[in-house]
Image (spheres, rainbow, N blue to C red):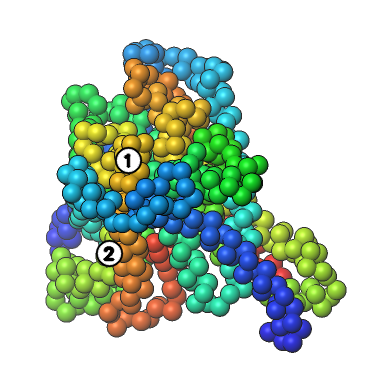
Amino acid sequence: MAGRSTSRHKIMLLLLVPFFLWIFAFLLLPAIMMLISSFQNEGGQGFTLGQYVKGLTHPLYTAAIKNSVILSLVSALVGLAVAAIGAYSFTTFSEKARDRMLSLSNMMTNFAGVPLAFGFMALLGTNGMLTLLFKQLGLSFLVFDLYSWKGLAWVYIYFQIPVALLIVYPSLYAIKEEWKESASLLGASAAQFWLRIGVPVLLPALVGTFSVLFANAMGAYATAYALVTNNFNLLSIQIGGLVAGDVFPRVELGSAMAVILFVILVIALWINEKMLRLARKGGGLP
Amino acid sequence: MNGVSGKKSAASRIGHLFVVIVILTFLLLPLLVTFLFSISTVWDHTILPKGYSFDSYAALFSDDRFLLALGRSFLVASVTVVLSLIVMVPTIFIVSLYVPKLERWLQSVVLMPFAVPGVVAAVGLIKLYSSPPFAISGTIWILIGVYFIIILPFVYQSTRNSLRSVNAAELMEAAEVLGADKPAAFAQVILPNIMPGIIAASLLSFSIVFGEFVLANMLVGGSYEVVQVYLYHMLGTDGHRSSATIVTFFLLVLILYVLVLKFGQRKPRTAVTSDAKEGNPFELRPDSKRVEKF
């Protein structure tokens, strides 16, 4: 009897082998190779910290990191603000309307990357619909260059909003109407309610969402790439160019930059994790 | 909703309506313009198109390059999803019922793809697979390999939740008491019961693979051109085909999305209801999708 059950156990563990092999071949081994490669000379020899030194000191790459961080911070902040206001407005509608609006917004998370780049070109490109409309209405001051940082920021904000709505909606939904009523009975204005109760209660969720959005933008590649190929000096674009660019590839430096990006993301997601824990603890606030 | 708040909300309701309309319009506008472009004849320096026709779609669906790319995308997505189910459903089943020690570990491994953007994942894969002995870069195999990893979180969550909501442990026990051995109990009792969840996960995974661009472009590019890479190549040269491709892609996503909702909400057929009201901590919805594809 015992023999039979251990052999059964062995068969079961055997069934797990394909999964382990797959994880090893396409997750673990590539990660190890990237890490090793990031410590090698150009050409893949020896051991050096040179790639990291270059990645963190060369003006081209420090600018890329800085640009990526600024773009991510700005797009995450604006995206979160818009989504928080939007999510709160969503909660005031009937359940049916709410579900429809959320489904629509969630659908739009699919409108990212290359399709998104096209949509914005058709809308705000040189001959885009809105560009021409603004010009004809004499509102030329509203026209901006889509292929500039300002244009890219708009596109990033665009793809952050549905993601932010998705994450932040549940916590705004938890703000109870009774809290507002009690606060207003006690003489608090709407502004006071939000300042003293609403925002503090939501803070962990907002910070958590912010870090997810930040990570989202830091890792984004397709949209900027589709807009102007390699012309924006962003960290993700640099990595892509170094590893798979048309000019001769420098995989080692690309690996080091990828590790740097990964570390930034881990920190952002770690903050998110902390905030989620805090939010769960503070969930029972009166 | 008493009288006071009722009066107050009459004024603020208009404000909320305004906010919602502005946001949803902003979100829909690029897609609407893309659609308008796809049904336009000429649209280069006027605010609205000069005329309308479905010629873009006719041209697109008679373009062999597009049809081939579409076929490749279907092939990659189907093979990946099928392989993932064959490997992952038994793995998740065994770990959650018989090797609970591995559960936490499995969960964190499976969630890892969330933290790794495509551009980072591509680096190690290029390093590893673009030279012998495993030179599969530029082929369908590397795509299947890495997409399997990308869809792991969705397949895991949905399968795990289904197992939990049908109370798989009790079902297995009951089946074994009635004389079925474990493989038979799994195939004839568990599998049919978790099918709706598995179908929902498959459809969602399919749409994720179908929309993936970064890895397809960096690892394979033109040597095995899938729809997203085709679209990228058309972007600068042919606005009509680009827009028609995008609308076609979005219609497909829409169909998959509706199906996911349908299957995701279907109640399991089992009569076991002991903890049915507990609900799933992470119910599968198309929106549990995140980040990595931008």
Does residue B97 lie above or below B58 as drawn?
Answer: below
Tell me what residue is drawn at x 42 percent, y 52 percent.
B49
Tell me what residue is drawn at x 72 percent, y 86 percent.
B2
Question: Dot 2 falls on which chain?
Answer: B
Local secondary structure at mark 1: loop
Q: Is residue B183 visible?
A: yes
**Does residue B230 appear to the left or right of B214 in the view shown?**
left
Few, some or many residues within 10 Å of mark 1 (<14, 14–19, 20+): few
Q: Which mark is residue B198?
A: 2
Tell me what residue is drawn at x 39 percent, y 16 percent.
A40
Asked which quadrant contains residue B140, the reply is top left
Name the spot of residue B111 as percent of width and height, x first. Answer: 40, 49
Quadrant assignment for the C terminus of chain B: top left
Asked which quadrant contains residue B182, the reply is bottom left
A30 or A128: nearer the eye?
Answer: A128
Three-letter code for the amino acid on which mark 1 is drawn: Asp
